[in-house]
Amino acid sequence: MPPELLIKIDVPISVVKSIYLMPSLMHRLECLMLSSQLRQEINYHTPNFHIASSLILEAITTLRCCESFSMERLELLGDSVLKYAVSCHLFLKYPNKHEGQLSSRRSGAVCNSTLHKLGIDCKLQEYIQDSPFDPRRWTAPGQKSVRPPVPCKCGVDTLQVPLDPKFQTESSAVKVGKPCDAGHRWMGSKTVSDCVESVIGAYYVSGGLIAALHVMKWFGINAELDHSLISEAITSASLRSYIPKEDEVKGLESKLGYVFSVKFLLQEAMTHASVQEQGVTYCYQRLEFLGDSVLDLLITWHLYQSHKDVDPGELTDLRSASVNNDNFAQVAVKQNLYSHLLHCSTFLQSQITEYINSFHEPVQGTKAPKALGDLVESIAGALLIDTKFNLDDVWRIFKPLLSPIATPEKLELPPLRELVELCDSIGVFVKDKCSKKGEMVHAQLWVQLDNELLSGEGCDKNKKAAKGKAASSLLKKLQNRGIVYTRGGSKRRKLDTDRVADLSSRGSENEDLSGQTKPKKQKMEGQGSRDSSRDPSPANYPNHAPPVIESISMKKGGPRTALYDLCKKVQWPMPTFDTTETKSRFANSTSSFCCLFPLQTLLYMQR
């Protein structure tokens, strides 16, 4: 434009720079208003309860948005809250059903397909934020975008998309999360089910179990805790025949630091199913079903509060390390609870003896008897009933028994998981082969280094255990060559200096801009051709220097976020990823289909 046509406006440059933030500010305000609208839909009000719009926004934001927050942590907590509420409801409602029947009903109530359907019925998909915000495509109300249009190809003329099978697909060709100009976007079914759990978790954080139960009721989940049923369960236990075993009961009560008001609950928690062969009509299995969900919730809530800066993936690992049969079996031995287990099985006794001896003389492959872990869970279930479902009292009693609880600094991964993460960090693949020889499974794992092929072998009764032993063997061989995996708060991987020098000889084609080795299996393609102004060569940058990337966070979603930030900073087209999906043959697997949903329109805009 000729200079004579320009008009000088006396606006400070700081004001002009602030204007560039307007699209992002308006987008965040719109998201917070959507969160507030969802809060009004749920409509839970009590005098001392308030849930922030920012917390609800966190519960409806996926990792795909590349924000500094996401639903992952709340989803982990909500999963435990949902499991606990449903378990308590089933335990109280069906006092005559055994543990297997209760577990089957619970699985059906909390599975992803059920939660997906409930979320769709409540139109939760319209609130979910599932794509990164692009300021260049933002337009003020009544304005048209100057960017190339994204035409709608789904054949729907209205904003609302019918819940029709033709708008559901398992094809990997659809672009999940990217809306068209009509406001339609594809969304994974598991995203909806995860969001149901994260919203439950958000209400639990703000208002405890009562608020979480209300939002479950809003979703249509039948998980009410009827106080009359609680009283009935306590009364029924108090009327059961109690065989006096003062030494056993008092000894266990002294170790727990709690005196039961209904002694039969503790006796039931101590009784193994093998005693039923002698005519006893009860065992600990129902209490174990209840206690499993109690400890799951209490430990998850403790980890959620204690490690607020830990990424969701590591928080999941902490829970997995704390809530499992092996850990509970160790508690039973260390606290000497195992001596109070009442059973009539010589085989179980031999297993317990072998396991206890392994604490003094470690023997590879010694497994914890499931009965020991079940004993700890059943005691937790008995405590919950005796305290009239007071979770605070149960945690006060159990926290000293469970200590020390896993921390990020002392977290140990299973051997196979550790091997996979180590190999991912150095850019090599793990190949495996399993074969069955009689009743045993033989597993072999291979890792190809620069000039050497390493292998590990393992043999056990099942595939998972055999691969774990093979991974342990392979990890030792890698460690002898200076390739070490370390896991701390930052989850960094370390290689010794010789190995780093060795890897650097592969050439820059296997390294990213931060100097870290890229996995060879990932493919990335740009969108269309680039002009010279966007060429990443050093000649196109000031002082002939390429863009500087800060250290990349290796937490879940970190590398992708860093890549998006780089593309925005240097005005490159946003990248696309070419991925291959491997479908599971199991019906209840985590693979999900995609549905076409509309973006939610604010009520004030509709008016």
Image: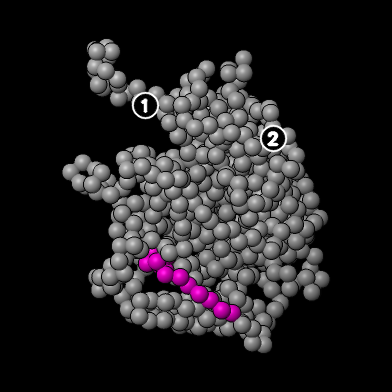
Which of disc 2 and disc 1 is earlier in sequence? 1
Q: Where is residue 281 in the image (x, y as percent from the top left)?
A: 80, 65
Magenta-highlighted residues: 422-434
* Distance (Cα) linking label 1 and label 2: 35 Å
Query: Pointer 2: what residue?
Result: 155
Comparing marks 1 and 2, which lies closer to the viewer? Answer: 2
Give residue 134's quadrant in the image. top left
Q: In this view, does 93 lie to the left or right of 354?
A: right
Toward the viewer: 273 or 209?
A: 209
Tell how many labels.
2
Q: Mark 1 points at which residue?
A: 21
The picture quadrant where one finds residue 13 is top left
Identify the image quadrant of residue 447: bottom left
Circle 2: element type: loop
Instruction: Decide which of 235, 8 is in the foreground and name it.
Output: 8
In the figure, 231 relative to 554: above or below?
above
Q: Which colour scheme is used?
A: one colour
Quarter containing the C terminus: top right
| Residue 364 horizontal/vertical position (percent) | 49, 81
